[in-house]
Image: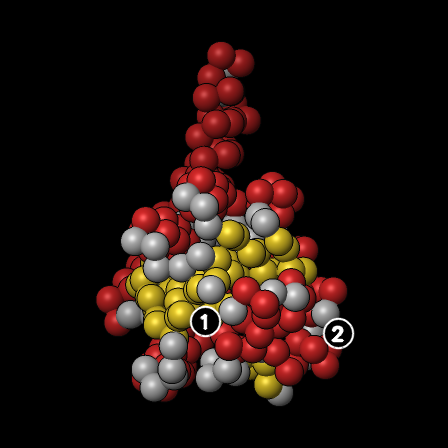
Amino acid sequence: MMRFMVFCDLENFRYSLKNCFQNHIDINFERFHLCLFNKIVQLLNIKVHNPQFVRAYLYTGEYTDAQIDQAKKHLNELPFQQKKAEAKIKDLETKLITAANTEKERIKRELQHERSNYFSPERVENLAMELEKAKLRQKAQAELFHSLGYVSFLELRTKPLKYSRKDLRFIQKGTDVQLAVDLVNFAHFNNYDCAIVCSGDLDLLESCRQIKSLGKTVILVSHKAQVSPIMIRESDYYLNLGNLTSDELKDMVVTN
């Protein structure tokens, strides 16, 4: 008997699917993990080994009130910070014209630093729009997470999204770490024989190597545009979603 578990980085997996479809698609969470398992069994022709599906784990970032409030606060602070930065840049530009040669390099470095911390009006406006989208996404996400609680053989693992003051956006942090930890821990507990990893993130390389050293099989699933060549080389089998037909993909993981 071969026992299979799916470990899916949702953001990475979505990007892989975006490379396969030009139009918008929604993942059918009620069946994608089981269909993916069946597709792997078919491609590897291993029915004789009595393959058994154990469980799937889905990893994703979660919008939280705390991070949204942090972004709101930063947005309110930006007008003052922008005016202060503009004044500093103008002052440095004036000093650069009359500065002695020995001072010019220092002033140039200061000027470069101030410019790198200045956000264009377009970026500030984008943050305001991103905040509005975040509120809608948080609501939709809450509904999705609630529905996932009723999906058989699927466990949700979430980490709060972080607001980056430097990038003016919400970013995913820690999901790949959680996935890597689960991969290794479950291997040590001998919970599976074969891991289907829906991600091409190079951060998972050492974890994949570790579970292989424990006698486990690693199957990588992604689009080639979303995977590191090293990860492909280190996996036991690589399924490039881009090699599947649209009908195969739609039947396996997505619904329009």
Front residue of this view, candidates 170 and 101: 170
Q: Position of residue 45 (x, y in %)?
A: 65, 66
Tag in front: 1 or 2: 1
Q: Is residue 130 visible to the viewer in this orientation of the structure?
A: no
Q: Residues within 10 Å of mark 2 (few under 14, many from 20)?
A: few
Q: Earlier in the sequence, mark 1 or mark 2?
A: 1
- Label 1: element kind: strand
Q: Position of residue 251 (x, y in %)?
A: 64, 82
Front residue of this view, candidates 131 and 216: 216
Which residue occupies the extreme front position in the image? 48
Residue marked by disc 1: 53
Residue marked by disc 2: 245
Q: What is the three-letter code of the residue carrying label 2?
A: Thr
- Residue at x 51% of width, y 68% of height: 51
Disc marking residue 207: none
| Image: 35 above or below 207 | below
